[in-house]
Image (cartoon, rainbow, N blue to C red):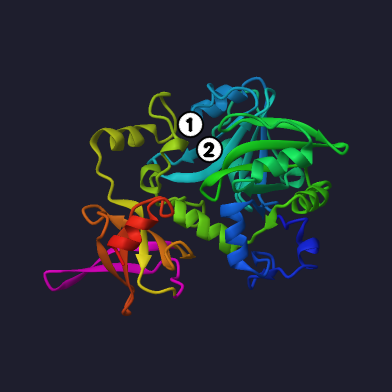
Amino acid sequence: MNESPLLPLHRKTSAQFAADDTTLLTFGDVPAEYAAAQERAALFDVTDRSALVVRGPDATVFLHRLLANEVKKLGAHRSQRNLLLSSKGKVLFDFELAFDGERYTISTPLGRASAFAKALDMYLFSEKVQIEDATATHAPIEICGPRAEDIVRTVLAADLPIGDGACAKIEWVGAQVVVTRLPVAGSPGLRLDVGPDGVHALWTALVASGARPAGRIVRDILRVEAGAAEALIDIDENVYPQEARLESAFSLDKGCYIGQEVIAKIDTYGGLNKRLVALKVSNDDPIARGTRLFRNEEGEWRDLGVVTSWAYSFVLDSGLALAYVKRRHQKNGTEFRVGDGPTTAVIVPLPVRANAVAITGEFE
């Protein structure tokens, strides 16, 4: 497991951790952290992510043949969300792929680099490709909010890359910061990677310039309100990309790749059995991942969905869940019983914050 190099710094603050003593839940004021993401800038520690580097003269062709998104069209200093699928078209790995003109860097969730390297190696035959675990040098932090870009530009004293997925290497106090534009918790944001030796100084400088540190609770609120599925929580090997709303992470035009035939058939003929939706909950009690959703049809309670994420939504002043719901039951306003208790939940349109007025007026 890759432990955050910022943990000693966080433990000197009012940070509160989960039972594992490493998952940072909040810096002590969840409403203020959420407000910062909406009004200024929220800063997240994701230094525990894992990474691989793929290089060699055949790296582009090799990755393009396997991965679901367009690798050959990924220009230098660009990044994209990408997937490695099973032969049945389901998601094995969900990650960011960046190309600096010489090598590809794959950023994955915590602890996934080794398994991903083994999966890639299974398809490596005579190609001239090297796959290396780069987790030890990967220490990204992420920032989002309306002032995020101004704060980063001020701290780095440099222009930032332009366009979705753009990357740049910027020299800063004797180190090199890789800056990437990408969604952060479902919102436009930036990822900054200066490596483990420089991340303490970078984090401190961003905070001093106005970014507010935020924990897992606020990150979950933001992404659930945006309907942004997260790997290993909402996305696993039982899910098709279309079910998880991952259309930006795969291509329908690039030709063959692992699982492509299944993805193409779904696009052509439909037939998804489930789809990720957001549900406004009748109270603010937390709902455990895996809780089932039921509807009464002709006097019989039918199991029609499963919750994968829950957060308290400030904009709705209620609980909000992401769940996979079976087809023909995905219409906005459809109500379910949550588990075996009296709690109910109703499907609401995504993204929740943009539709808050309609949601609170029509579905409360």
Which circle's residue, 1 or 2, is located before the other in the chain? 1
- Report crowding for label 2: few under 14, some 14 to 19, many 20 or more residues within 10 A (C-alpha): many
Quadrant, the N terminus: bottom right
- Say left or right for 49 vs 242: right
Residue 31 lies in quadrant: bottom right
Principal secondary structure, stretch drawn in magenta: strand
User: Residue 13, relative to residue 191: is it above or below?
Assistant: below
Residue at 27%, 55% in the rendered image: 332
Q: Position of residue 321 (x, y in %)?
A: 41, 63
Residue at 71%, 42% in the rendered image: 152
Q: Which residue is mark 2?
A: 81
Q: Which residue is mark 1?
A: 69
Tally of numbered discs: 2
| The furthest residue to the right | 174
Residue at 80%, 63% in the rendered image: 8
| Marks 1 and 2 in Cβ contact (< 8 Å) | yes
Query: Toward the viewer: 78 or 317?
Result: 317
Report if residue 304 lies within the magenta region. yes
Residue 234 seen from this side = no
Q: Position of residue 9 (x, y in %)?
A: 80, 61
Query: Toward the viewer: 118 or 133?
Result: 133
Q: Which residues are magenta?
A: 285-308
- Amino acid type, mark 2: Arg
| The furthest residue to the top | 57
Q: CA distance from mark 1 to mark 2?
A: 8 Å
Quadrant, the C terminus: bottom left
Report if residue 277 lies within the magenta region. no
